Image (spheres, grey):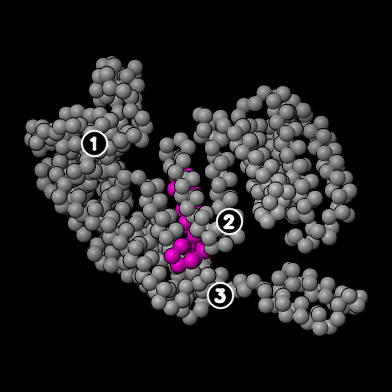
Amino acid sequence: MTLAGRNLWIAVAAVALGQAAVLGWMIWDRSSLLANGREVVLEVIPVDPRSLFRGDYVILGYDISRVELPAGAPRPKRNAPYYVTLKKGEGTLWTVAGAGAEHPRSVAADEVVLKGKVDYVSDAADRADARSVVGVNYGIESFFVPEGTGRDLERMVGDKKISAIIAVGEDGTAAIKGLLSEGQRVYDEPLI
Amino acid sequence: MSRYAKRLDRDLVRWREAGWINTDGEAAIRRDVAAHASKLELASILGVLGAVLIGFGAMSFVAAHWSEMPRLFRLALIFGALFTSYGIAGVMFERKHPYFAHAAVLAGVAIFGAGIMLIAQMYHIDGHPPGAVRTWALGALAAGVVLRSNPALGLAMLLIALWSGWETTLSNEVHWSFVLGWGAVTAAIAWQRWSGGLHLAALTLAVWIISLGYVLFNGDAHGVVVAIGLLVMAAGISIPIVEPKLEEFSTPAIGYGMAIAFAGLFALQFWQDTPLDRLILLAVVAIALVLGVIWLGLKMGSRGLLWLGYAGFSLEVLALYFKTVGTLLGSSLFFLSAGALVILLSFLAYRLHARVQPNAEVAS
């Protein structure tokens, strides 16, 4: 069975436009999250601070990547969604105010809920305070260094502490919006 | 000239000289063969290979992460390449060059995948890589169905396998959604009546079923795999009796069923720590299985089943050798028993060979 005539071109256009629409949707989804999401500033814990931006991409660690399991809460399953509520602390940085497997019913005006995925749950027995720790991935752990900018970024950052500006959408999806070095913006994610 | 055509060429001369067919008959047969010959040309193969290369090119382009180009330009390039590929596909379909058209469709699907990767990289999207592969697979499936393109459907099947394999590796649990994706692509392949694609689908499903043994019930479900394989084999054997119309599916079902059952038995014997008495029992079952398939292959005149049986036999014997040599049987005893088995097999083959000779040639 082969296509011919007008049907052929309708089919070709449908496939090309359909696939282009999927790509376009990805871009729109992300740029609208960056443009409209609430901003949260998180301290970055670099894995190797000296060569943070030298490679093609770096793995960023955060304080909120390890969340204490609230007392009495059931152990979450691996890869299950996990919601972490952040509250603006002293200065610009945000800290964990609550966590759970369900989206909290009420969120205060100065709080933001991040949706993550359970990476691992460490056992309570291993820790002195007998609390389990949940390792959470938020999808903001990889940063692709734009080629050629790694050195500039590195020079600007030096030994200073880095924090990340995260845009958080209504549903808790997070995206890296920019990087701060001691309060100064060193990288801004362009929308398009 | 294909192997079949070469052989027929020799036979026709022989038959004409024997007086079984006249010159007109010979000419008519030759014309018929020429008209129905598979038109797999070098140009078409090169076209598909070119499309694969373009796909890899697009992906390396993404990996290079060019910063000299502004982001908008990079995106425009991806969209431009996407529309160009499908545009070329349309023109080639119209000019009746289907092979080039399918190559262009394949390139379009590859560029779609590169686009997904480029956008994920540009926006630091780090959510769930297998999800991106799934999106790519769906794009390939859509292109395959709408443009009636078998190569795109083949790529969709490979991507479904990649997606499922990745998900299984990440979660170490059975990836049931595979069945949905596999079913959708297989339905499209069946609708296209593409027999090569059906083999690809069967192979993908077989690998998934075998993988069940390693993830279901804490990785101890190889018995289930063996049972499924034997059921598929039984279905394959009973097809010609129950529904003669579906006879063409009989041999493949036996082959894939045997491969599944054998892989399960293999894991039971050599992947796990098996006590000796159980190992011997399983080895006997495995050897009975491969001998059974060899016998079926001879009986049904299927060279594919024969080779599958031989391959299974060799694998089984080799694995047994490595597992047992020096520890319990001793290498000489092992070789003696294996040799006796092979001789038994050759005797079996010799006895049956004369009976299946004519059939075997037709089926191959």
Please name the residue that numbered disc 1 is placed on.
Answer: A62
Q: For mark 2, does the 10 Å Cα neighbourhood hold few (<14), some (14 to 19), or many (20 or more) residues?
A: some
Residue positioned 51% across, 34% down in the render? B215
Q: For mark 3, does the 10 Å Cα neighbourhood hold few (<14), some (14 to 19), or many (20 or more) residues?
A: few
Which span of residues is magenta-colored? B144-165
State how far apart marks 2 and 3 are (Cα): 25 Å
Magenta-drawn stretch, dominant element (helix, strand or loop): helix
Looking at the image, residue A76 lies above or below residue B170 = above
Q: Where's residue A45, x and y in %?
A: 23, 37
Q: Where's residue A177, x and y in %?
A: 19, 49
Question: Mark 1 touching mark 3, by CB under 8 A?
Answer: no
Q: Mark 1 or mark 3, which is nearer to you?
A: 3
Residue positioned 41% across, 55% down in the render? B138
| Residue type, mark 3 in image | Ala
Q: Indicate yes or no whether the magenta region holds residue B159.
A: yes
- Rendering quarter of residue B147: bottom left
Please name the residue that numbered disc 3 is placed on.
Answer: B43
Residue positioned 27% across, 19% down in the render? A72
- Rendering quarter of residue B31: bottom right
Q: Where's residue B263, x and y in %?
A: 63, 40
Q: Secondary structure at mark 1?
A: strand
State how far apart marks 2 and 1 are (Cα): 48 Å
Disc number placed over residue B21 in the picture, else none: none
Please name the residue that numbered disc 2 is placed on.
Answer: B198
